[in-house]
């Protein structure tokens, strides 16, 4: 039997950056299917609505066969159980990510012992990059074209000109 290896890459993706895409490309080398799933966090006010983030992911990732887009709220482990998926993908930029990711992976493992969290390291040039840095630069009208795909650059421009 050929195994179809599926993993979930959860995150806020507010907005999607080249760092996220780097992780997705690495994950696709190992998994047959990567479900990029937007976590809807009721405690955060996002820059992009869920619908806008779905639109961005769909457009930017449309040529990657093997990528699916989804979203969830509540516990990641409940979502994984429901989807019958046992592998979670996360990115590790620097040592600074480790503490949070370590807690998150261990909490998830406590709730769902069968799951495995797999970490990927982006190329060095993206290891400083985060959605919050992009949002901060964008807010003051800075150039984020080296950090996010052109589609996202345009969406950011629209957002700030329509405000
Ligand atoms: P969260 O709000 O859960 O941190 P993000 O969308 O910012 O969600 O990130 C989702 C995952 O992608 C996290 O594991 C994060 O460490 C990883 N990630 C974000 N930016 C990068 C990057 N530039 N390089 C590698 N991994 C990244």
Image (tube, rainbow, N blue to C red):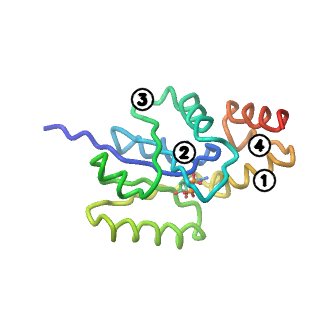
Instruction: Residue 99 in the image: state x and y as whole percent.
Output: 53, 73
The x and y percentages for residue 143 are: 82, 42
x then y, percent, for residue 108: 38, 65
| Residue that badge 2 annotates | 22
Pointers 2 and 4 in contact (C-beta within 8 Å) = no
Q: Residue at x 51, y 48 (%)?
A: 23
Q: In screen coordinates, is 69 left or right of 5?
A: right
Q: Nearer the viewer, mark 1 or mark 3?
A: 1
Mark 2 sits near ligand 1, with its Cβ under 8 Å away: yes
- Mark 2–mark 4 Cα distance, whole angstroms, equals 17 Å
Q: How far apart in space, not on screen, are marks 4 and 1 (Cα)?
A: 10 Å
Q: Are marks 1 and 2 in contact (CB under 8 Å)?
A: no
Mark 1 or 3, nearer chain start: 3
Work out how far the residue at label 1 is from the one at label 3, CA to CA, in angstroms: 32 Å
Q: Residue furthest left?
A: 1
Q: Which residue is label 1 attached to? A: 136
Q: Horizontal placement of 21 versus 32: left or right? A: right
Determine which residue is flagged by label 4: 144
Is the CB–ligand 1 distance for label 1 below 8 Å? no
Q: Mark 1, mark 2: which one is toward the viewer?
A: 1
Q: Quadrant of ligand 1?
A: bottom right
Mark 3 is surrounded, within 10 Å at the Cα level, by few (under 14), some (14 to 19) or many (20 or more) other residues, namely few
Residue placed most toward the observer, 5 or 74: 74
């Amino acid at each position: 039997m050929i195994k179809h290896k599926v993993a979930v890459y959860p995150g806020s993706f507010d907005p999607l950056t080249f760092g996220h895409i780097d992780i997705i490309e690495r994950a696709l080398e190992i998994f047959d299917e990567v479900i990029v799933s937007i976590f809807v966090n009721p405690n955060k006010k996002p820059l992009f609505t869920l619908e806008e983030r779905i639109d961005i992911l769909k457009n930017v990732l449309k040529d990657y066969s093997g990528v699916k887009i989804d979203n969830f709220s509540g516990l990641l482990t409940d979502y994984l159980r429901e989807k019958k998926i046992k592998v979670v993908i996360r990115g590790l930029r620097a040592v600074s990510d480790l503490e949070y990711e370590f807690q998150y992976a261990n909490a998830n493992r406590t709730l769902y012992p069968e799951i495995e969290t797999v970490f990927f390291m982006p190329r060095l040039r993206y290891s400083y990059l985060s959605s919050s840095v992009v949002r901060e630069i964008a807010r003051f009208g800075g150039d984020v074209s080296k950090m996010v795909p052109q589609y996202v650059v345009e969406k950011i421009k629209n957002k700030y000109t329509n405000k």
